[in-house]
Structures are given as structure tokens and as C-alpha cells.
Image (cartoon, grey):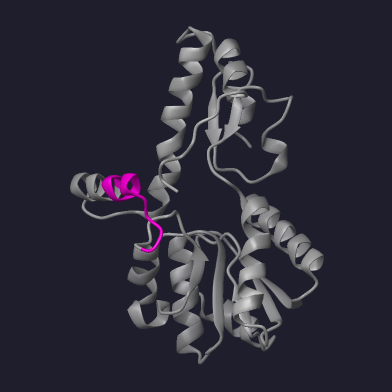
Amino acid sequence: LAALTITNPAKVMLFTFCFDKGAIGPKYPYTFRSIPTAYEFYTPMYQWLSQKFPDKKRLVLVVKNYAGGLVTRDIAVAAIEKQGFYQIAGTEYYQPATTDFYPVMTKILAHKPEILDFDACSGGDAGLLLKAARQLGYKGITVQPTQGDPVTIIETAGKENAEGHYFMGGGSDDAVATPEMVALIREYAKRYGSWNEVASQDWYIPRMLGLAIHKAGTVSDTDAISKAMETVEMKSPLV
């Protein structure tokens, strides 16, 4: 959101991960979301989870206390209330840059959750939350309705603590990966050492931007390129 005060007056195109609805719209014609957001993720994730675990209803939201975390909290609450299945037993917050998650996890577990929802926590935070939860005796379900990186979570939580953690994937699982996704994973790992689940999100924007530039017939007129970007369509070969 802070970047918009610089990029918008300068007519610089910005591709953002920001979930806040205020980050895009007619006021910011040069700004585009580069990924699907919690608005698209949360409802199907909760529906799937309720079907898989129909007897688990006490849910606690774990929220990183910053603008993005508060936005996703509100999205989660709206999705839960609309679905009408889960009882929000509590909401607990932690501060950015937290490294010791045992105190906050103690407060979280006091709500007696059956499901811990890590909201939009980053992979490292989610891993440390998982580790604290398991070491404090939590045996229930853990979920992260936004996309996460399993490698980071396993590295920070430990393999045994991360087992059974649910989050939205990027289409790289063997059961669903297309040949194009397999090729992307192979090339990414060759260049950077290992696959990062979030990497597929960044695959689209350069290609969409290229199509918009081609349609606009210019590489420098961001008014024309942004206008073209609004109508560009591309079928993803990754899903």
C-alpha cells in the first residue's frame, strides 16, 4: 500500500501480492494483483476441510498483526460466517519479527481448538507455530488457507511436526501437475537448487505483461499497456 504513493503518480506499473481491496481499482490504474487472494482461497478451503473433518468445528484464527494479516483475518471471518459450519473459538495475534512462538501458542491452545488456522502467516512463521503447537501437545488439525512453501515449513517445523499440515498448493503435486508444471519445477530446481511452491505465482506476470505490451504496441507508454492489461487473457498451462 505504501508503494502506491510512489508508483501511481509516476505511472509505474506495479504487480502486487497485497490482498487488500484498496490496493487495486480505478484510483490505481497501473496496479495489478499478481496472484489469487484469500477472497478466492478461503471458501473452497473451508468447504473441503469441513467435508474431510465433519466432526471438527472449534477453530482458532492465528493472525500476524500487520495490515495484510488483518485483511486476511476479516476475509476468513466472512468466509466462516457465510459457510455457517465453524465456531470461531478465539483469535490470537502475534507481532511481526516474532521468533519465540511458545507464549502465543500457550494462549492459543487455551481456547481448546480442534483446528488451528494460521491465516496468511509466512512459511517460516507457520513452521515455528507448528513446532510450538506440537511440542506443547496439540494433536489437532492445522491449516493455512493461503499458498505456502512446504520446504520452508518442514525446515522450520521439523518433518514430524509438519506432517498433516494443510495449505493451498500451486499445482505442483504429482497427482495434478501438468507436463508444463513438471518442466518448470525441473528447470527451477536446476537453477536454484530446489523447488519453491510460491514460484509458480511469478510465472504468469512476465507473460501477461508481454501480451499486454504486444497488444498496446509500445514498451514505454504505461497508460496504453495498463489499459491493454485489463483485457489480456491467457490460459494457464500450469493447472
Q: Against 229, is 127 above or below? A: below
The quadrant the N terminus occupies is top right
Numbered label tally: 0
Tell me the quarter of the picture where residue 60 sits: bottom right
Residue 151 x/y as whole percent:
34, 64
Part of the protein shown in magenta: 175-184
Q: Is residue 63 visible?
A: no
- Residue, far bottom: 137
Q: Tell me the chief SS of the magenta region.
A: helix
Does the magenta run of residues contain 28?
Answer: no
Does the magenta run of residues contain 177?
Answer: yes
Tell me the quarter of the picture where residue 5 sits: top right
Tell me what residue is drawn at x 68 percent, y 44 percent: 20
Q: Is residue 47 visible?
A: yes
Residue 101 x/y as whole percent:
51, 75
Observer-nearest residue: 131 or 40? 40
Q: Is residue 86 left or right of residue 217?
A: right
Q: Against 151, is 39 above or below? A: above
